[in-house]
Image (tube, rainbow, N blue to C red):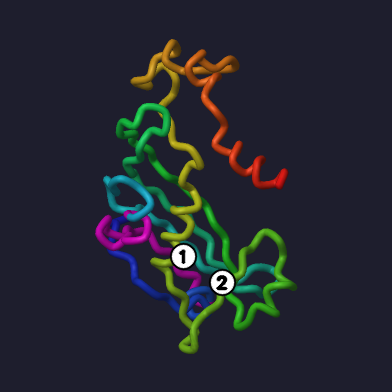
Amino acid sequence: MQKVKLPLTVNPQKDAQRRLNYAGYYAANQLKRLAKSVVNVLSDAQVTLSFYIDPQKLVVMKGEAQVEVELECQRCGEPLKQTLECEFAYSPVASWDQAEVLPQIYEPIEFNEFGEIDLIGTVEDELILALPLVPMHSPEHCEVSAQEQVFGELPEELANKPSPFAVLANLKQK
């Protein structure tokens, strides 16, 4: 199957009735919000989507996305390449009141006045959620050696440093 550029918006109702499947990509320069969250977006986002109607007669958009990004290691500050992968399953709703009755396996997604959903925004949201909380190299690949890392006891010069909150303690006593 050939990879093609995906549409920016889709009508999930029509696509589910036709049981459409998409396999394509979003170019790295289209992922502007993701680019603000990482050092660099290294590849296009590869996305596969399936639209169908489940046994409960709910419209479902199920998909996977993957992109390679460059992050900053929080231990050593050096670049770190990471592949972000995510899986998602959405069911479009007209209002958030309908979202309460959806099964828990589906996330609600609201469509606009034309019955369409922002597909690129949804995929980008999922990729941002897939970012690690604290990106770090594995200890054996990190530039910071184990001797440079401090665990437990603080060095003498840091242990004797006055607390920055001491001023607040004085104000509290007054």
Q: Quadrant of the N terminus?
A: bottom left
Q: Earlier in the sequence, mark 2 or mark 1?
A: 2
Judged left or right of residue 97, residue 12 is left
Judged left or right of residue 140, residue 155 is right
- Element at label 1: helix
Kindly give the residue lying farthest to the bottom in the view shown. Answer: 113
- Depicted 82 relative to depicted 5: above or below: above
The residue identified by callout 1 is: 122
The residue identified by callout 2 is: 109
Measured Cα–Cα span from mark 2 to mark 1: 9 Å
Categorize mark 1 by other alpha carbons within 10 Å: few (<14), some (14-19), many (20+): some
> Does the magenta run of residues contain 24?
yes
The spot of residue 102 in percent (x, y) is 70, 70
The spot of residue 68 in percent (x, y) is 34, 44
Kindly give the residue lying farthest to the top in the view shown. Answer: 147
- Could you tell me which residue is drawn at 56 percent across and 71 percent down? 109
Foreground pick, 127 / 170: 170
- Element at label 2: strand
- Could you tell me which residue is drawn at 35 percent across and 40 percent down? 71
Image quadrant in which you'd find residue 147: top left
- Depicted 146 relative to depicted 75: above or below: above
The spot of residue 22 in percent (x, y) is 40, 63
Kindly indicate whether the residue at mark 1 contacts the one at mark 2 (C-beta within 8 angstroms): yes
The spot of residue 118 in percent (x, y) is 43, 73
Q: Amino acid at mark 2?
A: Ile
Foreground pick, 68 / 53: 68
Foreground pick, 15 / 40: 40
Q: Which residues are magenta?
A: 17-35
Q: Amino acid at mark 1?
A: Thr
> Does the magenta run of residues contain 106?
no
